[in-house]
Each structure stands twice: as structure tokens, then as C-alpha cells.
Amino acid sequence: MNEANDLAGAVASEPADEAASGKGRPEAVPPDDRPGAGRRAARRREGTQPPLRHRIITVSLLTVAAIYFLTPVYWLVVSSTKSSSDLFGTFGFWFHDPHPLDYLHRVLTYDDGIYVRWFANSLMYAGVGALAATLLAAAAGYALAKFRFPGREGIFNVILAGVLIPGTALALPLYLLFSEIGLANTYWAVLIPSIVSPFGVYLCRIYAAAAVPDSLLEAARIDGAGEARIFSTLGLRLMTPALVTVFLFQFVHIWNNFFLPLVMLSDSDLYPIQLGLTSWQGYADRQPELYQYTVGGAFLSVLPLMVLMGVLQRYWRTGLTEGSVKA
Amino acid sequence: MRRVSRAPRRLTRTEARGARAASGFLLPFLALFLLCFIAPIGYALYESLLKVERTGPLGLGGETKQVWAGLSNYAHALEDDRFTAGFGRVLLFGAVQIPLMIAFATALALLLDAASARWVGFFRTAFFLPYGVPGVIASILWGFLYVPGISPLVEMADSMGRHVDFLGRGAVLWSIANIVTWQFTGYNMLVLIAQLKAVPGELYEAARIDGANAWQVARHIKLPLIRPALVLTTVFSLIGTLQLFAEPKVLKPLSNSIDSGYTPNLAAYNEAFTSNNQHIAAAEAVLLALVACVLSFGFLRLVGRRGKDGDNG
């Protein structure tokens, strides 16, 4: 249930930004001459900060929530240092005879290094897919925002409707279609559907309409620049914050997608990491060491995304909201 | 285009140039959109109206051909108790899990909004972290925390003399709900925070001068203002819930209570790849998309109307 949720946030934050026009809460803005700073100082002077009791309750509740969210991650870290027999035999929330590097090395080399291949596949699907999706969405959003032509709104509405269609309902017929034309069980089978992002078009249109001034385009045209050149030098540059957002979301969306590769691929050399790990988990009954490899592989696969989450979270505040403040 | 005239009108030079350039930018996306969105929908509809018939005596001959089936695939899907039970299951799941998750996310967003700034960054990152764990990995992870023998949770409960079974018939649906909640609460919280940040500061100032306490500010100012974000996170959670697949698929080997039609998506998948019946699978995919559209549009209309009745909040 990833893709649908990817969309929620950015769509939702859009109406919010209309109201935002420059008035951030104190935490949200640099501590300069924004209105919040003075207000906050005044509040402190009057001694109306929330009472200590409230702050203690707030922090305790937040701590309980943090324990809930972090416990499985902690378990994963601990368990990635254990052998299969220790996974079953020792207490899960504490270390036992840890050999992290040794076990992770075995994950990477098992079955001629198939894990590394899966990882590379995932990177390729998500990286190439997100890059192509971003460029396509940028071009389409730019066209919808900056040119007037018959049928423009109709096309935009059809693309918007695409945002609401459940991706898994499409994957099954897409597989049948791709088998007819011989594309099933190839890299293309996962890559092609991944580079179509209706939501990206939506975001790029909104952003281009606000951030790319018509007068600038006109000036470039009078100077004799072609449309393609204007788009690639002016349009793409002015749309960069939106493009970064689209890229990051599409990257996470492709990386997390399970149903599409599951349906499309039968050759394990083409698997992305998620599919590979489920296949290990499926064989673990017969080959107990695969339990340990599944856990270690899950740990390794989660690391890069966790880093990306840190980046994404920051972009949430700066890129998306500030970007559309201009709208 | 302000007006679309009936009589063919020659496009002005700028318009012609615009249309030409725009089509160059639009066509690559539109072509792939057609291939990956429009074509599968059309193909699913078409496939769902056909069935395979065997020729020869008693229908056992080697030759198979596709014949017109009318709506019989839909009838078959709807008469299949397992498929309808799966639908009922995800609807029950959504009715319980979505409100809980949204309430949880709202509570965290409001708490973070009210907390002192020093800790906010750490907590927000901690809550958002699970969103970076793909559904499959999250399910594998929680699967280990559910299964007796590995799970430290079960072990701790046992040592306190209580036996818990996360994967039993009654419990497994809510164990899945926990995985989904764990993954997406932080994400939804971030969406709500983004909207909370947009609330003008003067509003709080005015409320405080009027003597409102923190709870009243949250209840009467912040909540109504983040309503659009609440509506959208709910709609997208709804669409996500109907597609529930990775979690039950991964937990299936661990629990006897998950059958091949546990969710509509699982049913369609198994129909296509285990039973090799792509026509019924196509009908089930169409039904799934249809229910998702009806429910999400229905919900949007419902809250839209209520919004108009109330004080335009």
C-alpha cells in the first residue's frame, strides 16, 4: 500500500500552502525578523510557556511512541549480528556472540553474490526509473502549464484520475498485456510502468505554473531560442525543487513496490531486493541458514532508505511547502 | 482557450506554435500513460468478458479457444465466498485501522507541534523512519516478532505467564493492521505537520488572549484547519487498504489463518498465477478498482457535503 500513500502528503500539503504565504510558526522559520520571533520572546517574558507538567507529559507520550517505532529497527540491528541458531535460541532484544561483519559478508557472498545483484537491480529500477519519470513528468507538466492548446484541461483531468487508480489493479492486466508482446520477465517489464508518474505531472504542472514566468519564456523566444532549448535551460532549472521532490518520491515508490516485480518477473537474476528476500524467506524452512541471511539482507537493504528518509524529511519542509508558497 | 467554436477556426500563429511544441513535450509521457494506465484497464475489461472453452467431446479435447462469457466471470467472482469474504475483511480492516492510524498520527502531530523545539527533530525522524522500510521488509521483520520461537515479544509474555498468539485466526488481521500502522503513521503525521505549519501564528495569539488553553487551541483551531489533510490521508489510506497484499502474502507461510483469498488482491493474484484463470482474475481486478473508486469518491462527497453544512470548515 505504498504508492497511494506517497501521494497523500504532497497533495494534501498543497491547500495548506496557500494559507502559508509567509507566516511560519517559530520553529519553521529562521530566527530572523519573522513575526514569530517577536511573539515568542513576548510569550517568554509573560511567562506563559506551557507549564512543566505539560511538557513532561508531552515528552513521555512522545517517548512511548518512539519506543514503538524504533523497537523493530532495534531488533533488526541486534539480529543481524546473530547466527540462525542464535536467532531461535537467544533472547531477541539482546546481543549474543555478535559477528556482524562475518554474517553480513556471508549474506553478500551467498549463492555467488546474488544479493549484490538484487541490490544493483533495485538501484537500477529505482534510480533509472525515477530519473526518467521525473524528466517525463517535468516535460508534460511544463507543457500543460505553459502552453495553451485545445484539449489541455481534458488531458490533465485524465492524468489526475490516474492518481486514484489502485496500482495493483493495473499490474495484473499489464502483465497479461506484456506477455502478449513478449515484455514480461524482462527489465523493461518493471522499468516501463515505473517511469509513468501521473502525480509527478500534477506536481510539475502546479509548480511550473507558479515558478516559470511567461515573460521570461517570451524574452527567450524573441532572442531566437527554440522551445526545446528554452525548456532544458530555463524550465528545468526553475523547476528544480519540484523535480527533486518528484524524484525522491518516485525513487521510494519504485524501491518499495513489490506487486509489480512479483507479477512481472520469474527469473531471479532480474529480482529487486524485496522479491529476493521473500524468496530466501520461503526457502528458510529447508535451509535454516537462510533465516539469518534474510535478517541480515533486510538490515542491509533498509540502511540506504533510512538515510534517504532523513533527506526526504528535510525536503518535506523546505522543498514542497516553500516551493508552492509561490503558487 | 476561452471558447471552443463550432465552426473550424484557424489557430493563430502563437497557438499553432504552442500546440506543436506542447505536443513534443507531452507525447512521451502520454504514450507511456496510454500503455501503462489506459491499455491495462481496457484489456482487463476485455479479458473479464471472455472465458476459455475446450473443444472436443466432453470438453476434454486439446484445443482451447476464448469465447464470449458476458458477465459470468463477475458472477463467478461474486459467488465465490472466499473472494467476498476477503472484501469484507479489508473493509473491516479499513473501518478499524484507518481511523486508529489517522488519530494516532494526528495526536503525534499535535504533540510535536506543542513540544519544545529541542526534541522535535529526533522524534519526528524516529516516527518517520518506518516509512523507509518497504512493506515486504516490514512484514518479514514483524513476522519474526510474531512467530513463537524467535519472537522476543512472545517470550517476554510467556515469562510473565501469558500466552499470546499473534498469528491465530482472530488475531492475525490485527497483527497485519499493526504492521501497516507502524509503517504509515509517521508518514501521515508528517503530512499533517506540513499543514499545521501553515496555520498563521496570530490565530494562536488571539485564542490565547481569549483565554483558551492548549487543549482548546488544538481542538478548536488546529483540528479544523488540518481537515483537508485529514480527508486526503484518509482517502489514500482507503485506496491502500483495498490493495492490501504484501503483508498477508509474507505472513501466509507463518500462519494457517491466511488463505489464498485472504484479501481481494491476494485472491486475484492466486487466481491468475496458481489457478491459471486470468479471466476471473481480470474480473476481480476490475471489481477491486471499481470498489476503490466508489469508496474514495463516496468518501470525498460525504465529507464535502458535511463541510458545506458546517461553518465552512
Image (cartoon, coloured by chain):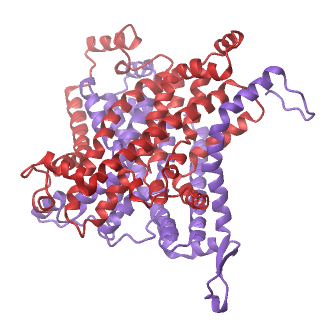
Residue at x-position 40% and y-position 28%:
A315
- Residue B198 visible in the snapshot: no
Q: In the orientation shown, which residue stands out farthest toward the right?
A: B7
The residue nearer to you, when weighing A130 against B267, is: A130
- Residue A71 visible in the snapshot: yes
Q: How many marks?
A: 0
Q: Colour of chain B?
A: purple
Residue A81 position in % (x across, y down): 14, 49
With respect to residue A257, does B7 lie above or below?
A: above
Q: Left of B64 or right of it: where is A34? A: left
The residue nearer to you, when weighing A268 against B259, is: A268
Q: In the orientation shown, which residue stands out farthest toward the front?
A: A112
The answer to which quarter of the image holds residue B20 is top right
Q: Left of A126 or right of it: where is A324? A: right
Residue B164 position in % (x across, y down): 21, 65
The answer to which quarter of the image holds residue A138 is top right
The residue nearer to you, when weighing A112 against A221, is: A112
The answer to which quarter of the image holds residue A87 is bottom left
Residue at x-position 64% and y-position 67%:
B48
Residue A37 position in % (x across, y down): 35, 12
Q: Which chain is red?
A: A
Q: Left of B283 or right of it: where is B109? A: left
What is the quadrant of the C terminus of chain A in the image? top right
Q: In the orientation shown, which residue stands out farthest toward the left?
A: A97
Residue B4 position in % (x across, y down): 84, 32
Q: Left of B52 or right of it: where is A320? A: left
Q: In the orientation shown, which residue stands out farthest toward the top?
A: A33
